[in-house]
Image (cartoon, rainbow, N blue to C red):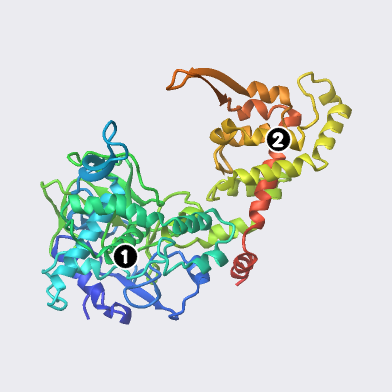
Amino acid sequence: MGPHTSSSSSSISWYSDLIQWIHNNGGYIHEDLLLQQEEEEEEQDQEAVLSSNSKNSKSSSNHNIRGIWAIQDIPKGTVLIRLPIQLAVSGKSFPSIYRANSTTKIVGGVRGREEEVELERKASPWLRCVTALMSLYLNSQKSHHGNGKSNDINGNKWEFYLNSLPNDYDSILVESSWPDEDIDIFLAGTTIGSIAQKDRLSNTLRERFDLSVKPYLIANKIIGVEDDNDDDLFALFQKACACVSTRGFHLGHSNNDGRNNENVERQHHKEKEEETDSSTDDYTGPFLLPFIDLLNHTSSAHVKCTTLQRNTMARRSSNNTNTTTTSTDGSGYFSMMAERHVNKGEEILHSYGQNLTSGQLFQTFGFIEESLIRRAATITIQDVNGNSNSNSKSKMLLAQQGLTPAILSKNDILEACQYIAFSKVPQELEYQLTTTPELCDCDDFDYWDLPSPQSLKKRNEEKVIQQSIPEDFTISFHEPLPCDVVTCCCIQFLPDEVYDEMIMSCDDDDDHGEDDTTKTLSMLSPEIMLQDYFLGNLVIKTILHALERKALQYNHDMERFFFVNMNQ
């Protein structure tokens, strides 16, 4: 039995075909690396998905968790994988600038007349990589049409990589993996769940496909203008989106080791708006990397045994061994080396990215690391804000790593402000200001009667407030409070005369030459406003109350699942 075939799990034909294809094209896979695949029940529940550390939780055929393991001891410094860059799927060869038809209203012509014009557009690296993958799938479908499946190892260049990719992805982008009822049960109260539900109701992904993706496919002659298989094409687009999200790698910082190496990591799902010139060599990802994308994730520096790097000097394997020769074609390669001794029977793990939060891991890769679940379950708002003992301080330090920022709606803040205003908090602060010597002696501290409900209703209905205050605020544990959320809170507590000073009026001439008075809102600095004892405490207690209410929205069944898993 040859290399990579010493287990029944590696009898999967696509696995041995994939390795042979990589070797035939100048790559190298260490002979003591083996795919291990754990079959699970067909009806796999979402609890198992959430607590996995694997984006490989669904294979090409059955539900399973798979990864790459060492079948013999592997010494430190051994090359594990070397993949020529020409075997990476990326959007580098697709243009960042393209021209596409767009319907626009003609100004100055017949009223309401619209006309199709050709406009220059920009394509993000994400769109270019998704397009590259869709192109491979479409070419594969054409080559198989009426001919059956090809078994030629040197035939379709990408066939053996495509066969290694899952048919289904445990991604929230895929409705079949995360139907609406599962989002309601398992993601209740979460920002990710709310965004997913809103996107599905508004059909955001389909609209994006019609307006941006399909024109780019047409511009690159991947599909024709008259192609009418939109539903099939959209399904392929969803599949490509999930693949690039869960398996895409991005170039990181240089490690400055003098060997032209760059660190490479997976990156949480975020379409980069900045564009790169396709004529230059500065494409930084996403990249889809055959075989390398079979490795699973760990955030533990002690468990991790390798790091993915890209070398800009091309090297090729000789006779499928670890011996390499230098090439001058400038193509480069991706490589992984054992950074410590790897024991027989140990899984080969690397990090998808440093300090990824549970939200980023789930949104991008479809799982939450168990260590983050434990951390979230053992750290509470009271721990990090109400206690000063050493144990609580340790928890605060832990909390700064991996906690997902909270997104609070404007309505969340307004309800919390109302709760604090009608609670005993204002009276307690007034009592402290009048009885505590240190506070009494400070001329800068004062208290006042809070605005009436009628006054607040009028403030919040003002056009300038509705336009200046966003609908959502992001609250991060270790970042300063945003100006907009502090300003929103202060509007609810400041006396009328101070509020009026925040609103500045200016007179402008409108298009008809008539005076038009507009108002602007001065955003308040958190550093200044929170120094006021009375106002600062009202704002902080409001935000804490809003965060506590947000935490209570989480489904109790999911909370029970977290604690059950920790005790197993």
Image location of residue 486, percent across then percent down? 63, 34
The alpha-carbon separation of the residues under discs 2 and 1 comes to: 48 Å
Residue 238: x %, y % from top left = 34, 61
The spot of residue 351 in percent (x, y) is 41, 55
Q: Residue furthest front?
A: 110
User: Of the residues tagged 2 and 1, which is closer to the observer?
Assistant: 2
Q: Is residue 440 left or right of residue 218?
A: right
Q: In the image, is residue 487 above or below residue 6? A: above
Visible residue check, residue 309: no
Residue assigned mark 2: 456
Would you say residue 149 is visible in this rendering?
yes
For residue 500, above or below residue 296: above
Amino acid on which disc 2 is placed? Leu
Residue 235: numbered disc: 1
At a point 57% along the width and 30% down the height, the residue shown is 464
Give residue 477's position: percent from left, percent from top: 59, 43
Residue at the image point whose x is 57% and y is 41% from the top: 478
Quarter of the picture holding the C terminus? bottom right
Label drawn at residue 187: none
- Quadrant, the N terminus: bottom left
Q: Which residue type does callout 1 highlight?
A: Ala
Residue at (57% x, 60% y) in the render: 373
The residue closer to the viewer here, 111 or 543, is 111
Q: Is residue 233 left or right of residue 429?
A: left
Residue 210 placement: quadrant: bottom left
Q: The residue tagged with tag 1: helix, strand or loop?
A: helix
The answer to the question of whether label 2 and label 1 lie on touching residues, with beta carbons closer than 8 A, is no
In terms of secondary structure, where does tag 2 sit? helix
State which tag comes first along the sequence, 2 or 1: 1
Nearer the observer, 397 or 460: 460
Q: Nearer the viewer, residue 412 or 242?
A: 412
In this rendering, would 506 be left or right of 272? Answer: right
